[in-house]
Image (cartoon, grey):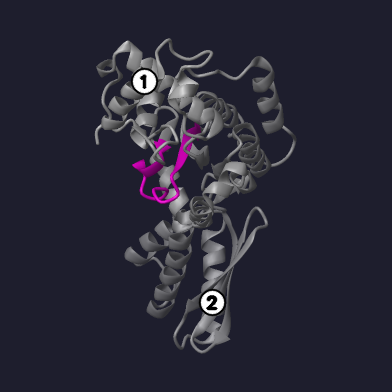
Amino acid sequence: MPTPPVTELNERARDIFRLVVEGYLDSGQPVGSKALSGEGGVDLSPASIRSVLADLERLGLLAAPHTSAGRMPTDTGLRLFVDGMMQVAEPSHEERKAIEARLAAPGPIEQALEAASSMLSDLSGAAGMVMIPSREPRLAQIALVPLGQGKALAILVGEDGGIENRVVEIGDTPANILEQVSNYITARLAGRTLTEASAAMHKEIAEGRSALDKASQDLVERGLAVWTEDAARRPVLIVRGQANLLDESALDDLDRVRSLLDDLENKQSVAELLEVARDADSTRIFIGAENRLFALSGSSVIASPYHDRQGKVVGVLGVIGPTRLNYARVVPMVDFTARSLGKLIG
């Protein structure tokens, strides 16, 4: 159902709707007419309030989980509140200083990324997520070691000292050819990224400048293809604070929480969702069934891209939790953390 514009609601309906949403976000529980007519509520009788609640329910903005349990906002209602009624609470001066200091602690950038994920979890009471920018290592050495049965172990050593291994199919290629290919790649492609190395090899072979025979050329191309394809599809995601999702309210809905934790284990899918936020101009909010991945767990994601000093998007960070997240506080916190982290990325 399309979200009705907030202007379609009269003042009385807007007030009651806002109180229901704020009460639900604060407690995680449906809000009844008696609570709405109490101190700090609206100056209407419970009967009049129930009439307005019924109207809001017919519009698809509220739902009653049980016959007499009061109302809670639907995903559509939360979207209306977030887009048209929410008053954000900007981080205080002390909070901003604390975020900047924690991110700027001495250490590699990966440490700052871990700190950002943990900090978002602490601030939101949900799980924090940071997608690490994909930074391909520059090659220092490649070695192909025969394993037998038509396979070899490809060992890649990066200039940063990192080592990764892959098993590749080599058919009946003899050991001396493997050594020749290893030496050739190392001599000609050292100092380049895998993407650069692959492009250079394709160009050399296409122009007939490669000193390798046809079988060796095929092996080089297949080996580099395995590496570059694997690196491209492998999400690098840091998730912290999953334990926050197991709060007291989770005891009433263990199936939902279990589904959410299962979703978080599927980092490829989570990374794909965060990729949607890469091109956003500002923080994106995904509520409940609005995104396919978290439809079953009824969860919300607040995500923001972060940029390097040249303004290029290099990653995405955010939080995930139940739909009753404190959006007014978490949205500006995610946005500020993204901007602070971007200042540290070269």
- Residue 310 visible: no
Question: N-terminal of the two: label 1 or label 2?
Answer: 1
4, 110: nearer the viewer: 4
Which residue in the protein does label 2 denote?
180
Secondary structure under tag 2 reads: helix
The C terminus appears in which quarter of the rendering? top right
173, 266: nearer the viewer: 266
Say whether residue 298 is magenta: yes
Front position among marks 1 and 2: 1
**As drawn, is 318 to the left or to the right of 56?**
right
Quadrant of the rendered structure where residue 66 is? Answer: top left
Kind of residue sitting beneath label 1: Ala
> At which x and y percent is residue 202?
37, 62
Quadrant of the rendered structure where residue 109 is? Answer: top right
- Residue 187 visible: yes
25, 111: nearer the viewer: 25
The answer for how far apart the CA atoms under marks 1 and 2 are is 86 Å
Report the span colored magenta: 286-306
Q: Residue at x 38, y 22 (%)?
A: 17
Secondary structure under tag 1 reads: helix
Which residue in the protein does label 1 denote?
47
Q: Is residue 147 above or below residue 68?
A: below
Kind of residue sitting beneath label 2: Gln
Q: Are marks 1 and 2 in contact (CB under 8 Å)?
A: no
> At which x and y percent is residue 237?
55, 49
